[in-house]
Amino acid sequence: MLVSGRIDLARTLLNTAEKMGCSLYIPEPHCTELLAWNSEVQVIDRFYMGEEAWEMLCDFLEDVNKDSPDDYPLRDEDGEILLEEPLYDTTPIIIIDSNIRKSRRMFRNPLKPPGSQVFWVEGGPEDLVEELVIRILRDGRADLSDAIDCVNARRMRRW
């Protein structure tokens, strides 16, 4: 999922998704689809997404990722068990805000369970975002430092 108005990045990730046999979903700004749409990785520009939609996502993540065993099992009004244990949201997030310092002051951090991946890639250079997405789709994880080294080596070969 790409939550950004950047056409260049959308084209790059669309090509990547096609090569990897995936689909790319691009919701409207101020979207709330992240709460219901299952994705392998989310690339988000929080300024584009909007503060209200980001807050809704953060509220959702706090609800599903809070670690309070006292809240489970979840039951309905009749006492029937709805959920035995928590459903954690571990979807990797690549945050591509244009000004990370400003955005970190404006927006709260997403609550993810330990071991989840949240990447902060200021401005979202398309080659680095693409490399992270490929690694997440292929391996289920990515290492930011290794991805940066790979992208920088590729850039040097082009010079």
Image (cartoon, helix red, strand yellow):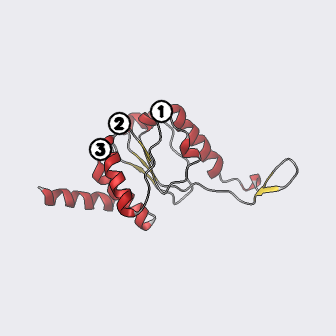
Residue 73 seen by the camera: no
How far apart are labels 3 and 1 at the CA level?
20 Å
- Pointer 3 local density, CA inside 10 Å: few below 14, some 14–19, many at least 20: few
Badge 3 amino acid: Asp
Q: Nearer the viewer, mark 2 or mark 1?
A: 1
The residue pinned by badge 3 equals: 8
How far apart are labels 2 and 3 at the CA level?
18 Å
Q: Nearer the viewer, residue 40 or 122?
A: 40
Q: Nearer the viewer, mark 2 or mark 3?
A: 3
Looking at the rendering, in which quadrant would you find the C terminus?
bottom left
Specify the label residue 50 is tagged with. 1
Query: How many numbered dots are placed on residues in this image?
Result: 3
Q: Quadrant of residue 17?
A: bottom left
Q: Nearer the viewer, mark 3 or mark 1?
A: 3
**Where does residue 13 sit, x and y in percent of width and height?**
35, 52
Kind of element beneath mark 3:
helix
Please tell me which residue is depicted at 14% across the width and 60% down the height of the picture.
Answer: 157
Please tell me which residue is depicted at 14% across the width and 57% down the height of the picture.
Answer: 158
Q: Earlier in the sequence, mark 3 or mark 1?
A: 3
Kind of element beneath mark 2:
loop
Q: Earlier in the sequence, mark 2 or mark 1?
A: 1
Badge 1 amino acid: Gly
Question: On the rendered structure, is 126 left or right of 68?
Answer: left
